[in-house]
Amino acid sequence: MRTWCWVLLLAAVTSTAYGRQNAVSGEARSLTPARAAAVEDGVRAFAGTVAHDVTQDGPTAWRKHFSDSPSFFMAVDGRLVFPNSAAATAGIQDFARTNKQISLKWGDDLRVDPLAPDLAVVAASYHEVQVNTAGQRVDETGFFTGIAEYRDGRWKFRNAHWSEPVPPATVP
């Protein structure tokens, strides 16, 4: 009798898991080619707006392009620098006190991978020039990845990761 109960329990769990898997993959399949193209176009336009706003308005422009939700986080070079939206707000304000100007350009390799009607992966090389309040210039080139989420009528980054190339190791 005990074995029979385990078999029924296993069957119920398997059936539930299978049903959920089909629901998730069914959601992905519901992204028609036309809708996927619209998501891609919207996210590409969003990425262009981000680069424009950050270049025109400086570091504080980032705040309006990062999701103000508990799901937001940002990593740089493999380290979590903003574990949440509040940390991002504080970090941006601190950065803006010493860095007044940023010029951001995405590479021609910008990729958008629509995942759902309201989610897409964004990836691109980037070049950024930062000028601090003392007039010192810092050039950074690297690669960006993030998830863009459509919420409250606009696209925002739900998370972001910036990385710069690691210099090749020197052999003694």
Image: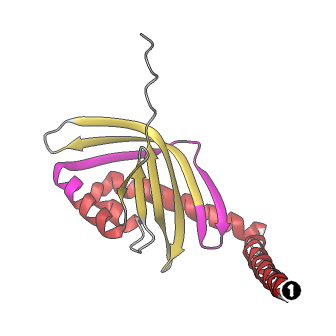
Drawn side of residue 117 relative to residue 27, left or right: left
Give the number of callouts. Answer: 1
User: Height in image: 69 above or below 139?
Assistant: below
Query: What sort of colour scheme is used for the picture?
Result: secondary structure
Residue located at (73% from left, 75% from top)? 27
Residue 78 position in % (x across, y down): 44, 46
**Which image quadrant: the N terminus?**
bottom right
Residue 97 position in % (x across, y down): 16, 54
Residue located at (72% from left, 74% from top)? 24
Drawn side of residue 162 relative to residue 136, left or right: right
Residue 127 position in % (x across, y down): 42, 40
Q: Secondary structure at mark 1?
A: helix
Question: Amino acid under label 1?
Answer: Trp
Residue topped by disc 1: 4
Q: Residues within 10 Å of mark 1 (few under 14, many from 20)?
A: few
Residue located at (58% from left, 65% from top)? 42
